[in-house]
Image (spheres, rainbow, N blue to C red):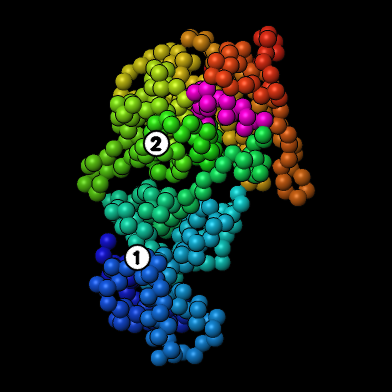
Amino acid sequence: MSLRARISTPEEHGSRGEDGHLVASYRAKLLEEIDLAEMSSLAAAERRARLERVLGHIISREGPVLSTVERSQLIRRVVDEALGLGILEPLLEDASITEIMVNGPDAIFVERGGRVEQLPLRFASADQLMQTIERIVSTVNRRVDESNPMVDARLPSGERVNVIIPPLSLTGPILTIRRFPRSFTLQELIGFGSLDEHMVYLLAGLVQAKFNIIVSGATGTGKTTLLNALSGLIPSHERIITIEDSAELQLQQTHVVRLESRPPNVEGKGQVTIRDLVRNSLRMRPDRIVVGEVRGGESLDMLQAMSTGHDGSLATVHANSAEDALTRLQTLASMSDVEVPFVALHDQINSAVDVLVQLTRFADGARRITEIALLDSHGGEPYRLATVARFDARPMTADGRVHGAFRYFPLPGRAADRLYLASQPVPQAFGVARTADQLATREAR
């Protein structure tokens, strides 16, 4: 995108009374005094610094007389609206904000610490919000208009962006920005109360022993965060292929191949799906395949890969319980263009999936592993889940927090034997079930 497209002119935006006119006026003066060709050669940080210096000279020369704080605020606002995303720019720089939700020009919400709050900010008009949205989507060579009123994209800096505009949205242009999650280690997740040391020891052994693990949970429960932490347990010498819709995983190993799907272009061509990438990854000699989220026919290809020698694969799926995750995998696999009977898909899931890790987001915003279950069924048997770890929540306290305790149950003998053969100990907190009665099992459809 050209620099002139990124530095907007006064006519592009509405105003907020005298303050809005002042910002628009100085933005016009700034545009007159800079050399666009020279600015284009600068890095983003240098470009912002140069604009701030030039604008400072303009204010010193032409007024108005402002206090140091007022002067800094005016410079920040003018440069943000000229080069950045206006009132959203400070929100994007606030590391405590994990999600920005713009519900039309008059309602801006953010998520901090798992809690959603409304901010006393607003766009001057729907047109100004639309200009900001167009600037965002143009950075990824997308467009949004009445013929293409929905856009789902990832910014170069990593944030996931979703846009929906009228006529589909009845409350004006809607913009949702999910911040690129920082990579957390399992030890850091222990500090957040998401799991405990005993569960880390177990998960480490399961990953090292190449169990196929499905992380499930509802939206915003931290599936990608946990998947990223679990992938850090994969030995560094293995060849890992990651497949995502929006590249968020940040693996630290040296032999990592990152693949990202591609939406169709403005002509509706050139789409590359997750399923295309999963199929192609099988030809790339992977030791491990990590799929950010399965949400369609690629589920069948992933299950086939898991049950035909690509052990140790990791993936996430959107589901509200471990049982729901199995049902959803079966349903998604049936969406493939290959017609496979439901019974055969059932057998395939029994053969491919070893572990289900269920995440839940509680009313206080805390995200925790609420269950680790091993799939202890075979062939055409009904799904039989053996719970080996569970979080028992207590009622919310007066301070609005949800407390509880992690409980542990014996591992099925078959899983314990597999850990033993991989030289991975069974953590003492769990132990091994010697009889079926000792297992915390349940059947799922």
Kind of residue at disc 1: Ala
What residue is shown at x 47% (from left), y 63% (from top)? 88
Residue where numbered disc 1 is placed: 43
Q: Position of residue 224 (x, y in %)?
A: 50, 40
**Extreme-right residue of the structure:** 398
The answer to whether residue 62 is above or below residue 302 is below
Tell me where residue 27 sits by quadrant: bottom left
Residue 99 visible (yes or no): yes
Query: In the image, residue 240 lies at what x, y percent?
Result: 40, 32
Main secondary structure found in the magenta portion? helix
Quarter of the image for residue 1 reads bottom left
What are the residue bounds of the magenta stretch? Answer: 198-215
Q: Which residue is mark 2?
A: 255
Query: Relative to residue 104, is residue 268 depicted above or below?
Result: above
432 vs 302, nearest the viewer: 432
Give x and y (percent) for residue 93: 50, 61
Q: State how many labels appear.
A: 2
Mark 2 belongs to which amino acid? His
Image point (38%, 49%), residue name: 154
- Residue 293 visible, this angle: no
